[in-house]
Amino acid sequence: MTKILIVDDDLALADVLAFTLRRSGFEVVLAHDGREALEQYDREHPDLIVLDWTLPHMDGLSVCSKVRAESNVPIVMLTVRYSDDDVVAALEAGADEYITKPFSPRQLVARLQAVLRRAIGEPQEILSAGALTLDVERRQANWKGGSPIHLTPLETRLLQALLQNVGHVLSVESLIVCVWGPEGATSDMLKQLIYRLRRKIEPDPAAPTLINTIPFAGYVLNLPADSP
């Protein structure tokens, strides 16, 4: 049975989440502060973590970063915070999905199932084009002769889609499906993810030359042989 760790200091909401997920066939483990979350993670080895941002003792972003440093377990941030800066910070810390409160229980279950499907079905492969290589399993990109560039799971899936279609424009909708699955995400979330990936692989993120925005069409990855 798939085990989900719910981390939220709102005890009533945590109980509602636990009831919803158990009714959908999941095993549920609860934690109500950041330190307890890490203890439960080490003890229970959950298949997925649903993580609030504002927690006693250690905030959810710090918990996310610590877990991501040692594991690829899917992490879903479930929070009242909704600004672009919050989404960027969560993606940078390694979150796989970002859901704001209030939420629909049915939609939450569907999105958690989508995250789990992506984690199970993620292909283990190495892709390359020009001087850029992506190790999907390790979540590392490399420019020929350079140091490894560590990516989050979402950044890995985005770069994977772009590398598999070098020189071809991918629509916003198709990229969202490639990265988040058929349940999707918003165009703003994709824009923020593009921004994060540019910061890691572009020679000058302020003037990107590799990941190009095509107005009213989407994005395209262009890789000259001697990039970057």
Image: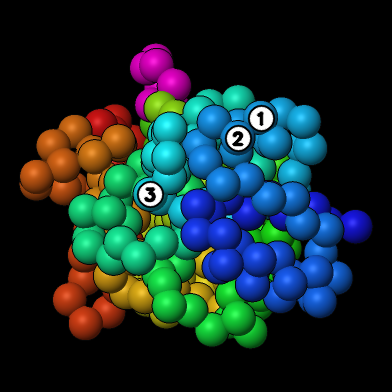
Instruction: Give the residue at mark 3.
Output: 54
Q: Amino acid at mark 3?
A: Thr
Q: Which residues are magenta?
A: 142-148
Residue sticking out furthest to the front: 12
Residue drawn at x 30%, y 46% is: 89
Residue drawn at x 36%, y 59% is: 167
For label 1, count other residues whose C-alpha is less than 10 Å away and answer few (under 14), some (14-19) or many (20+): few
Marks 1 and 2 close (CB-CB < 8 Å): yes
Instruction: Give the residue at mark 1.
Output: 39
Image check: 42 left or right of 23? left
Establish if 223 lies above or below 87: above
Mark 2 lies on a secondary structure that is: helix
Establish if 125 lies above or below 80: above
Image check: 83 left or right of 69? left
Mark 3 lies on a secondary structure that is: loop
Residue 219 belongs to magenta span:
no
Mark 1 lies on a secondary structure that is: helix
Q: Quadrant of the C terminus?
A: top left
Instruction: Give the residue at mark 2.
Output: 36
At which x and y percent is residue 110?
Answer: 65, 77
Q: Amino acid at mark 2?
A: Glu
When asked about the image quadrant of residue 182, the answer is bottom right
